[in-house]
Amino acid sequence: MERTKLIVAIVHQERVDSLTTALSAAKMRLTTISTTGGFLKQGNATVLIGIEEERLEDALAIIKENCQKHKEWITAPALFEVDRSVQQPEPVEIEIGGAVVFVLDVDSMWRF
């Protein structure tokens, strides 16, 4: 029986098109779910990839190649103090992009 893996890759929204195009070109089955990140509330996509175990490293290489990190400056929303004065935070540089990847074993899979 062929061993199958499920890759769950959470990627920044601006990288999802290049990633899904590259995965599709490599004949990998996938589906994408739009999601939102917790801290920065930025758009993400969760890409689900069903892959044979022997193609796992190829899929991970495609994810790494298409989901590079980069730096960006953001300003958090203004903070309101108890005395109702407004405190405007300074812009901060953050690293965004990249991918958070989980690889799960699939005990059984059916194709209908």
Image (cartoon, rainbow, N blue to C red):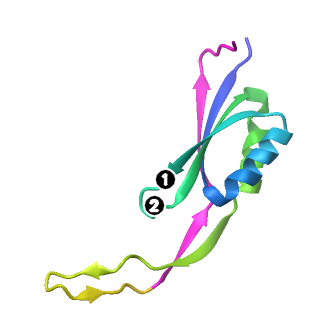
Image label count: 2
51 or 14: nearer the viewer:
14
The residue depicted at 49 percent of the width and 53 percent of the height is: 36
- 38 to 82, vertically: above or below: above
Q: Quadrant of residue 60?
A: top right
Residue linked to disc 1 = 36
Q: Position of residue 56 (x, y in %)?
A: 74, 35
Residue 6 seen in the current view: yes
Q: Quadrant of the N terminus?
A: top right
Q: CA distance from mark 2 to mark 1?
A: 6 Å
Q: Earlier in the sequence, mark 2 or mark 1?
A: 1
Q: Is residue 4 left or right of residue 75?
A: right
SS for callout 2 = loop
Kindly identify the amino acid type of the residue bearing the numbered disc 1: Thr
* Res 41 label: 2
Vertical order, 77 against 68 (above or below) = below
Q: Amino acid at mark 2?
A: Lys
Q: Residues within 10 Å of mark 2 (few under 14, many from 20)?
A: few
Farthest left residue in view: 83
What span is in magenta?
A: 91-112
Judge whether residue 61 can be spotted in this image: no
Q: Position of residue 112 (x, y in %)?
A: 69, 12
Report x, y in % for residue 81: 20, 82
